[in-house]
Each structure stands twice: as structure tokens, then as C-alpha cells.
Image: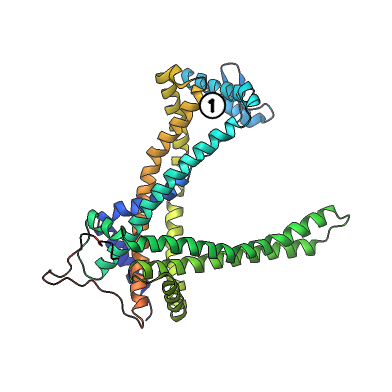
Amino acid sequence: MKLDIGDILSRSWRITWRHKTLWLLGFLVALPGSCSSGFNASDRFQGRGDGPRMPDGADGLGRGMDDLTRSLPAGLREYLSQLMNEVTSLRQSEILVDRPLLLPGIILLLLATLLLVWLLVGLAGLVARVGLVRGIDRIDAGADAPNLRQAWGLGWSARTLRLLLAEVLMGILSLILILPVILLAVLPLILVVPMQAEADSPELLPILAGVGILLAGVFLILLLASLLQALRQLWTREIVIADTPIGAAVSQALATMRRQPGSIFLFWLALLLVGMGVFLALLPVSLVMALLFAGLGLGLGALLKAVLGGLLGAFGGLISLLLGLALSGAIFGLPLAAFEGLYAVFTTSAWTLAWRRLRGDGTEIPAVQPAAGEAPAAWPEADNGNA
């Protein structure tokens, strides 16, 4: 059975746009990725006159930054100067000299807290992903669209735990497969380039050979990653929709790929092109949002410092800056996660519809069967642990 890619993509978009309940599930699916992305900026300033400036060695850029900081309001210039003073005093603090493990301990505590939050959000995202896949499957099979409670009930099931175990096991297997390729790709470059650099008369051919091996390794890594990603989409639906054990789900996914390698490749390529188009369309917006994120975070930090004052302690400037960046990240991150969630609904719909049509080639697709006395397309309230 050859996939009608155009029909699948158009129907996926209709499902995505028509069923607004799925948007919240997609938002929860995309939220862990949005939480793990952040903004990292490190600018080094030196105080001079009425505000911070760049080092004198960066002539043109330094003068441009001087002009920029002079155009800022006086309160914001004072806030930036205070930040630089706090960074300097923190590096010279006797507390860090007497207790060198204090700062790493604080950093590790913050990282552990962020990891715990990310794991909780990731668990909610996994439940939402299972509910999203099963909900779309039932919609395509002719059932009514689920409400939020019904979709969450479909996700909160034993199949979710099985999928989590499969993700861990297949992640380890993927690492085992890809890591040797990475080592083989990088090793010639590490050995050849330094030897040729130290030689009196370096030869171009070994260097080109090392670069060629590296590029071939990168291509092979991308090929393996793409293959594993397609297999992951297939075995996920075997586990989540067909309620198949992990081993049998992987075997069924491999069998499906062997039956229709060309169709799956073209479908994967079509989704890749759609994703690249969305990325390029949003790239200017993302750059503007990144600048607004940094500016709003700095402004909120200055506002918090002005309002809270001494309540923030000796390093109130740095603490207020972190709080401001966190608030700014929430303000800009939530709309981004909402859009990514909408796109997640579309791609999840596309892969689910493709799986249903591929699995219909020689095997039976589980249909939505109404219980006795129920009208067709009735929805269960939950799985009752029997999923």
C-alpha cells in the first residue's frame, strides 16, 4: 500500500485545526523541550564614567557599546554598574576563598532542582503524548473528538509506562550504535591534523582524508538518527495504539519499514521539508524574540531590584537579574511552547495516520469498537488500568 502523503498531511492539518482540545496536549508535549532551552549571555564590562563599557581593545565595538549604554536611562545604567561590581566582589569574596565548594554546591543544588522540575514536566508530557496519539487514532477511526479528561485518561495507562521503558532501552541501544561511528569519524581527524601541523612539510592529502572521513561519519550519524527516529515513531504507535509488548513492537516496526521503505522515506522527507519551512519562516521572529527576552529580563531585573531593594541581600543585583530572566523566559517561552505544541499535534497526527495506513498493509488495525448498548464512536472515561 503506497502512502498518499499529500492526503495524510492535509488530513493531519484538518485534525489539528478542528480539534482544539488536542492543542493543550500538544502544549504539554512541547513544554519539556521549551523548558530545556535557555538563554546564555556573558558580556564583560569595565566601569568608566557613568556606566559600563566594553574593554578598550574592542575599539569600534567598545565605542558602540559606550554610546548604547549612555542612551539608557540613568537607573538602568546604575543597575548595570551594580551588576558588574557584584560580579567583581563575588570573584574576590573571602567566602569563596575560605569555602571553595560553596559556589559549586549552590550551582549543583540549582541544577538538581531544575532537573526535578524538568522530569515532572517530562512525565506530564509523556502522558499527554500517549493521550494525543490514542486520541488522534480514534478520531481517524471515526470516533468523536475526545475532551481533555478523556484524552488524559487514555494517556494515564500502563501503556505509558511501557513506552517509557521502551524509550530508555532504545535510547541506550541508539547510543551504542551511534557512539562507535562518532569515535571512528573523529579519531582520524584528531590523529592526522595535529601530526601534520607539527610536521615541517605538512601534506594536504592526509588532512583531506581526515576531513573526508569526518564528513562521511557525520552523514552516517544523520542517516542512523533519521532511521531510528522513523522506527521510534512506528514502535511508539505499536505500543500505544496496538498495545503490543516492547520486543514485538520493535519487530513490527522493522517489518513495516521493510515492506514500505520508499514510502516511509518519502513521508519522512516531506515532514522534514515542512519542518524546515516552518523553521525558516519563524527564524526572524525567533531572533527578535531573543533580543526582546534579554531586554525584558534586564528591565524586569532592574525593576525588582528597585522594588525589593535590600530584601535581596548583598548580591541583590545578580539575584534580581536571575529572577528577571526567569520571568522573561516564562513570558516568551509559553507562547513559543504553545506554537510548538500546535506543530506537535500536526506531526503526531501525520505519523499516526501514516502508521494506520502502513499497518493496514497485511495486518489488522485495532478499531474503536463501541461497548454493548453504546452509540457508535462512544468514548471511554478512562482505561481503568487495562490499557
Tell me the residue at 42%/28% (across/down): 300
Task: Say above or below: 226 vs 101.
Answer: below
Question: Could you classify mark 1 by the number of other residues whose Cα lies within 10 Å: few (under 14), some (14-19), or many (20 or more)?
Answer: few
Task: Say above or below: 68 vs 384.
Answer: above
Residue ID for mark 1: 68
Residue 167 coordinates in the image, percent (x, y): 45, 62
Q: Nearer the viewer, residue 205 or 243?
A: 243
Q: Residue furthest bottom?
A: 362
Q: Nearer the viewer, residue 122 or 76?
A: 122
Q: Nearer the viewer, residue 336 or 324?
A: 324
Query: On the rendered structure, is 102 left or right of 18?
Result: right
Task: Say above or below: 338 vs 213.
Answer: above
Q: Can the viewer see residue 173 in this picture?
A: yes
* Disc 1, SS: helix
Residue 137 falls in image quadrant = bottom left
Tell me the residue at 42%/76% (across/down): 252
Query: On the rendered structure, is 222 left or right of 285?
Result: right
Q: Can the viewer see residue 285 in this picture?
A: no
Task: Say above or below: 112 vs 361.
Answer: above
Residue 148 coordinates in the image, percent (x, y): 24, 54
Question: What is the tally of numbered marks visible in this picture?
Answer: 1
Which quadrant of the rendered structure holds the N terminus? Answer: bottom left
Query: On the rendered structure, is 368 left or right of 74?
Result: left
Residue 386 coordinates in the image, percent (x, y): 28, 65
Residue 208 coordinates in the image, percent (x, y): 74, 63
